[in-house]
Amino acid sequence: MNPHDLSYILDTFFLLFAMTLIVFMVPGFAMLEAGIVRTKNVSAVLTVNTMIYAVASLMFLLVGYQLAFGGWENDSVSKWAAFLFQMAFVGKTVNIMSGGVSERARIIPLLLFAVAMAAVIYPLVVNWTWGANMLKGTMLDISSMHDLAGSTVIHSTGGWALLAAIMIIGPRKGRYVGSRVRVIPASNIPLVTLGAMVLWIGWFGFNGGSVGSIASKESADTVALTIMNTNTAGLAGAIVAAVIVYLQYKKFDITMILNGALGGLVAITAGADLFDIYTPILIGLIGGALVVFAVPFFDKLHLDDPVGALSVHLVNGIWGTIAVGIFTKDVSLAAQIKGIVVVAIFVFVVSYITIFLINKIVTFRAEDDEQLEGMDVVECGLEAYPEFRRTI
């Protein structure tokens, strides 16, 4: 076997393994969201997550992949493995958005938006950053932005789409009473914990796989460093969130601790391959702290986000991309900021228009009495916990 064939086989296997870890994040999102929402909305959340994976992946196969990369050709690995790895990412942008509008969004309009995101919005962002780059040579060219696995390309993209959706759909019934924020407790904390930890594990494929190769000593070291740095940022995010909430309330809030970890993971995603082993501690600490302070900030603006996706994915997607420009010598901070701004304007504007138009055809928001009854009965006809008394 010649060296090229061996490299081809190893890297193909590596991408398929990484892709499997990323797809493993689908049940991670599903379990986290199912645990956060009330029992009367669990089946709807599970249905949405399952259908997003199916619809978004198929649309990326039919339309999005070619738009993003300009074709299927790939000499270094199997072109089918290259597609599957990229396909594993696409649904995450919609998962971020769907989790943030849980308990009041209907399934059909969410899936219509998933079609638009997977076929056009996300592929165009990928095209400009990781792909064919139709903006090359123009003043909007953002290909010099370093975003290893998508702090901006994936997490902020989903976050900007979520912000547009919340602004159109509005908060859950009863979430805000005047200036007071009504606490809506999670239904199943063990599921929240399981979901977050599954996401954490999946992140090793998310970031490690984005290195693209493991068939040489140098690339193997880069993959290992990337995964180590990814884990370190998650650890730091969890710890700082725990410390801050304890200092604030003299209590440990496991949901905030887990979101702190996820915030650290999002923040490190842009540059996990570039940092030394200590910088991710600082990036994760800042990421976890940002989550803790961003959650009440968004509530003050009456932006109802049950899972804290704006705080985790949008805020830390921005922070993580900026951090690369701050803590590395070879990446321009100006290029990082330019990339953030171009993606933000494009995704928010196009998502807002798309959701606005979908909402005119199929109403996104469930009626107040339907929210009271629960999306399980209204949308699915199947309750996740039929023996439990449903809460308002």
Image: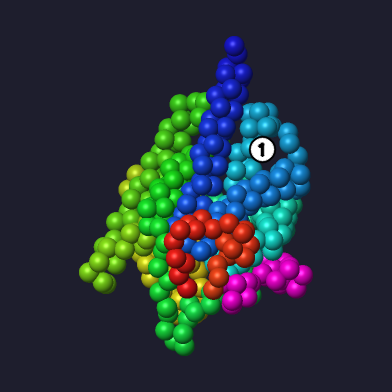
178 and 78: which is toward the camera: 178
In percent of the image, x 68 and y 32: which residue is there?
80
Give, as a three-letter code, the residue at label 1: Phe
In the rendered image, which residue does mark 1 sit on?
A: 83
Whether the magenta-drawn stretch holds residue 355 is answered as yes
Crowd tier of the residue under label 1, counting other residues whose Cα lies within 10 Å: few below 14, some 14–19, many 20 or above? many
Whether the magenta-drawn stretch holds residue 221 is answered as no
Magenta segment, prevailing SS (helix, strand or loop): helix
In percent of the image, x 46 and y 36: which residue is there?
223
Q: Secondary structure at mark 1?
A: helix
Q: Eyeballing the image, is 169 above or below 332?
A: below
26 and 158: which is toward the camera: 26
In percent of the image, x 60 and y 43: which residue is there?
88
> Is residue 121 visible in this depiction of the protein?
no
Residue extending furthest top? 1
Task: Give the quadrant of the N terminus.
Answer: top right
Tell me the magenta residue range. 350-371
* Image location of residue 41, percent across then percent down: 53, 62
Numbered label tally: 1
